[in-house]
Image: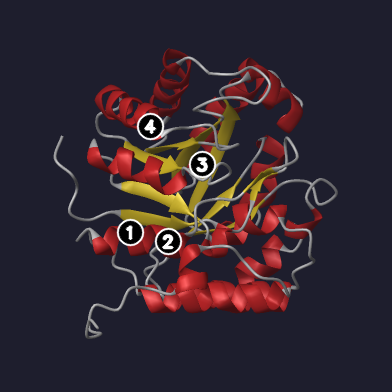
Amino acid sequence: MTRPSTVRIREVGPRDGFQNEPEHISTDHKVELIDALGRAGFTRIEVASFVRPDVIPQLADGVEVLRRIDVPDDVRLMVLVPNSKGLDNALAVRETFHDAAIFVSASETHNGKNVNRTVAETMADNDVMATRIRGEGLGCAAVIATSFGCPYEGRVPLTRVLDLAERFAEAGATEVGFGDTTGMANPGYAGEFFAAALDRLPGVEVTAHFHNTRGQGLANAYAALEVGCSSFESSFGELGGCPVPAGSTGNIATEDLVGMFHEMGVGTGLDLPAVIDAARRAQTVLGRTLTSHSLVAGQIDWHLQSV
């Protein structure tokens, strides 16, 4: 397939990034950082998760964050809902966001450890939630975790993942994201995977969500791009990861992903210096050095004279 000339990137740092950070992030700082991301040109930001506060205390202030942020009108805000109870809580503040994401793990073991349910139980609830989300006039997205491998079960069969994706689409999801939750993908398989996903899901937005746990995140994103994927998720500052199991850290850094695309002539609609600035702000808020390459080395300046 032809490489896309433009891509869409959803910033997931305020949810997927923050949730795995050990340092407490104040509501004021969350609002400051999300507002900075909104000014960087993002049209899609994942802001909150309606999980139990005792499970992920870092996101307990999600409703207040949603109510206080001030981003441009064209920014679509997404929340993650783990189950019907979470959706009930989200719909109580339905006016604060535009899209709701439902999810499942492709691996039975990971799904059980993550949400204490079987895959079948989770999908039955997801079918109900998708109908309710669409009935509220909200966008419905779906996420499949451990799409490329499970730390407990190993390689997850591609057919199993795509069967789940097709069921989500039949339930009404207009976007399906495939998560490399613990960084087990490689570029060869990523290309094969997204070629199959794009073929299996016509009319559905197919989104790549890679982690850089083992240093292959950008290479995997490139492989997905080369077979026609034009929708990606990433986290500024390379924040986040997966709390199950321990050690599965690191979404691909948004600033690194944007920098790579821009160097390739692929449009993102984003202001790269502004994205890097937001990551620097996050670094200051957290009080520690973040690891994205763009923060360490800066963006390439082709206007400099060679010496």
Q: CA distance from mark 3 to mark 1?
A: 35 Å
User: Along the polypeptide, which appears first: circle 4 or circle 1?
Assistant: 4
Image x and y of residue 271, in percent? 35, 75
User: Which quadrant of the rendered structure holds the N terminus?
Assistant: top left
| Tag 1–tag 2 contact (CB < 8 Å) | yes
> Which residue is identified by label 4?
190
Say few, some or many: other residues with alpha carbon within 10 Å of mark 1 (under 14 / 14 to 19 / 20 or more): some
- Mark before the other along the chain sequence, 4 or 2: 4
Q: In percent of the image, x 31 and y 35: which residue is there?
A: 204
Secondary structure beneath dot 4 equals: helix
Question: Looking at the image, is 195 positioned above or below residue 293?
Answer: above
**On screen, residue 95 above or below 213:** below
Per the rendering, the mark at residue 260 is 1
Residue type highlighted by circle 4: Ala
Q: Nearer the viewer, residue 241 or 113?
A: 241
Q: Please identify the residue farthest to the right as the structure is shown.
A: 54
> Residue 93: where, in percent of width, then height?
63, 59
> CB atoms at circles 3 and 4 under 8 Å apart?
no
Q: Give the CA separation, mark 3 to mark 4.
A: 30 Å
Which residue corresponds to mark 3? 133
Whether residue 143 sits left or right of residue 19 in the image: it is left
Residue 202 visible to an observer of this rendering: yes
Q: Amino acid at mark 2?
A: Asp
Decide which of tag 2 and tag 3 comes sooner along the chain. 3
Count residues near mark 2 (Cα–Cα under 10 Å), then give few for <14, some for 14-19, many for 20+: many
Residue situated in front as seen by the camera: 58 or 172? 58
Pick the front one: 117 or 233? 233
